[in-house]
Amino acid sequence: MTEFNTIYNGLISGQEKLALVGLGYVGMPIAVEFAKHVKVIGFDINETRVNEYRNGIDSTNEVGDNIKNTTVDFTADPTRLREAKFIIVAVPTPVNDDNSPDLRPVAGASKTVGQNLAPGSIVVFESTVYPGVTEDICIPIIEKESGLKCGVDWKIGYSPERINPGDRVHTLTSICKVVSGMDEESAREIKKVYDIVIKVGTFPVSNIKTAEAVKVVENSQRDINIAFMNEIAIICDKLHIDTDEVLAGMNTKWNALGFKPGLVGGHCIGVDPYYLTNAAEKLGYHSQIILNGRQVNDSMGTFVADAAIKEMIEAGMAPKKATVVILGLTFKENCPDTRNSKVVDIINRLKEYDIVPVVTDSWADPVVAKQEYSVDLVPWEDIPKADCVIVAVGHNEYRSRSMMQLKELFRAEISDEEKVLVDVKSLYRMDELKASGMRFWRL
């Protein structure tokens, strides 16, 4: 009979190896952290990415200089997975154009794992999926490719990733990790392995479906709360009152939740609710709240662009002839991640009015911006003088700029009243904005 309760001891003693499948914003930090304690193989199909890691280059900016000293054995050779007894799968789970779950990366990773699975292994998926995917989709693929029976020759578990790209406070080791296994034996072993690196401890749940639900529910909750704030912002705009001041007053109450309006993109909050509602639809339940929240949040890029156009018209300019500069493309501040960026919605809406904005972002990869969004990023020093500036992302370099420095971005020949500043993230104080004399709008 295959023994699975010796994997932890084998890892600690150095007799066994752990493998990561998928070395992006989630997988790579996990690999680097585990490598401080056990032998780790880091696998990714992207050879360019693997070579960057080997050369000490971290394009995700998640581990920084630690990439230069890590002992992770980075590889693009899937057969190296055969050396590992504990395999973690952390590949992306995007949505299709119709917002249905795109499970091709997970299915592809399952196939790769199955083709290179050693008997006696435990496989843990971290990719965000709807409840049932791990057992109903991943297990059959791995069994078919490996010829090994799940529960007999190998076992499986699920532990939802909670890494927050760009966050230097809530890091992998300081975030409680939800863990689950297909049975008590696998659940215990999976918990022991993750406890090697999770300093604050792990939180076991009774089964894999529950663990899968935890992730999509926690992000759907955030999405709904932000959608409410975005709806409040729309209402405040129509009432001609400042949303930020309203929320500042609301937050003086002890039970206020502290959410703010904004563009909701990225690989989690802007995607996971669709995984949950898709699962519900298959069971005959149509979401009443979650999808409406998604509809509000997905509309905010258009709302911001329309507000900018209105401000330009009221400033007396012809928007088609105006030079519009957008500061920021990534989906969040101080992070190079452009996945599912909602700034693109602002750009596309402006293009509907024949306005081709100039976009700059020193954090974003120009090659990725061009490939994914057909956006040509312009270096800061090459930005033309603007009629309208949209500060779309709260990068520190934008947040720290004074009103005088912001004014330098505009054409000198136009008056302050004709300069249009759109502050999407409410980075600047109201008194500073009013004192600048510029025409401003903020979400």
Image (tube, rainbow, N blue to C red):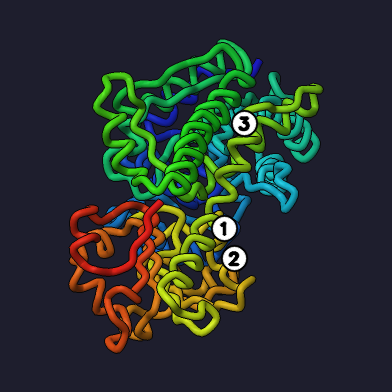
Q: Which quarter of the figure has residue 353? A: bottom right
Residue named by callout 1: 302
Q: Nearer the viewer, residue 55 or 105?
A: 105
Per the image, the residue denoted by label 3 is 290
| Residue occupying image coordinates x 27% and y 22% | 253
Q: Are marks 1 and 2 in contact (CB under 8 Å)?
A: yes
Q: Is residue 390 above or below residue 175?
A: below
Amino acid at circle 3:
Ile
The image shows residue 31, relative to residue 211, as above or below, that is below
How many numbered circles does the render carry? 3
Tell me: residue 222, above or below residue 180.
below
Q: Dot 3: within a 10 Å radius of its alpha carbon, few (fewer than 14), some, or many (20 or more) residues?
A: some
Question: Where is residue 167 drawn, in percent x and y?
Answer: 33, 45
State the residue in front, 34 or 169.
Answer: 169
Residue drawn at 75 percent across, 27 percent down: 286
Secondary structure under tag 3 reads helix
Residue visible at 53% across and 32% down in the picture:
224
Image location of residue 72, percent across then percent down: 40, 50
**Tag 2 residue:** 349
The mark nearer the N terminus, 1 or 2, is 1
Between label 1 and label 3, give the one nearer the viewer.
1
Measured in 3D between alpha carbons, the distance from the residue under mark 2 to the one under mark 3, in whole angstroms, is 24 Å
